[in-house]
Image (spheres, helix red, strand yellow):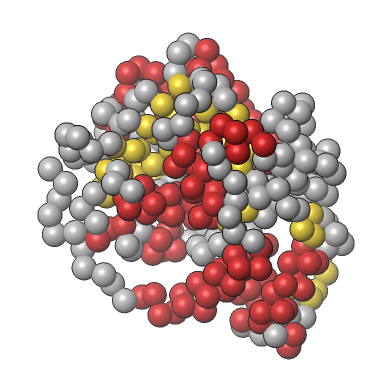
Amino acid sequence: MEQPAAVAAPVPGTPLALVTGVAGFIGSHLAERLVTEGWQVRGVDAFTDAYDPARKRANLRWLQTRCEFELVEADLAADDLGPLVRGSDVVLHLAAEPGVPGSWGPAFAAYCRGNVLATQRLLEAAAAGGAPRVVYASSSSIYGDDAASPVAEDSLPRPASPYGVSKLAGELLVGAYARRGLLGVSLRFFSIYGPRQRPDMAIHRFIEAALAGRPLTLYGSGAQTRDFTFVDDAVAATAAAATADLEPGAVLNVAAGAPVSLSTVVDLLREQLGPSGLAVRRGPERPGDVAWTWGATDQARDRLGWTAATDLRSGLARQIAWHRGRARAGQAAPACARPVP
Ligand code: NAD
């Protein structure tokens, strides 16, 4: 077992959040919000090669100018997690091996390691006195294909992909540690989109193709429907779960509650990008891609005081602006001059 790099001591009087997967799409936005809200953030990432690690380093550009932020490069599935977790008021666990289509076949070993083993090791460190609360980023993929109406948290999980199975296993581990007294809760994210979205995800691929004048590839009929949720909204729900009055083992959907087909997304992008750049090439349906996702939102509203605030049209505009500005984002900001004591 490797020792992770030394971590800075918590600053007395400032709450400390450990954010795993901090360099990823959602984790980097979450850490930015927490720093802005007055948290000290210890961010952990292994910079895995699920996609280009340089993109992940770019996601941290603003955070690394902030003295309230500390980056620790560590692998949750292998390194000693005690020193990382110790002193945290909450662990927000977003690190994972992401993506449905790639989870079949021999690749599943990486999903077991990244989503099951890593989660168990983190929970063990938290339960050993490292942190009183763990918020786990789960997924709508645990539900499977039965969501032609809003799916509530107590529906029977029937994941349609090995990825969904691995995320459900993580949730069940949170439940097992919750029964031992850890305040572990799970948030089921529904199709998050927005600036920095992972490059394998549909909206990212569509916008990049359109801006490059290439045809975009739409897998399946286009009628498949997703409850797209803007990243700032998902992050607001996650930040709320860091302090909300929740019982150990609580599970909440984080969904906009407004499902839209992929063909409609293409039409909305066409509206904003102009028709010329949006030729569509059809690809075969991909195994594990479900027909519907649609989350019931009343639990998140009642328990977190949260509802999604961003409609799809304006969320897409913000993501398009990010793709357009990516080339300009290379200018480095000054690094934090004063390390957190
Ligand atoms: P992402 O791939 O952008 O971020 C995950 C980060 O975790 C990466 O930076 C990666 O390097 C890091 N990581 C992976 N394994 C690690 C390990 N063993 N140790 C340390 N770091 C490790 O993914 P994302 O889209 O930001 O997703 C974040 C979380 O939300 C994941 O748990 C994912 O399953 C969940 N989720 C995402 C969506 C979505 O639409 N993006 C939907 C449902 C659930």
> Residue 60, image x and y in percent?
36, 59
- For the N terminus, the quadrant is top left
Report the residue at 45% width, 13% height from top: 181
> Residue 10, image x and y in percent?
20, 35
- For the C terminus, the quadrant is top left
Q: Is residue 193 left or right of residue 76?
A: right
Q: Give the quarter of the image for residue 56.
A: bottom left
> Residue 195, image x and y in percent?
51, 64
Measured along the vertical axis of the image, is residue 34 above or below residue 171? below
Asked whether the viewer can see residue 300, the reply is yes
Q: Give the quarter of the image for residue 129.
A: top left
> Residue 143, image x and y in percent?
74, 36
- How many numbered circles does the render carry? 0
In the image shown, does 77 or 197 lie closer to the viewer?
Answer: 197
Q: Is residue 64 left or right of residue 194?
A: left
Residue that lies at the very extreme toward the top in this rendered image = 180
Report the residue at 59% width, 59% height from top: 310
Report the residue at 54% width, 55% height from top: 231
Measured along the vertical axis of the image, is residue 181 above or below residue 44? above
In the image shown, does 283 or 240 lie closer to the viewer?
Answer: 240
Report the residue at 32% width, 53% height from top: 36
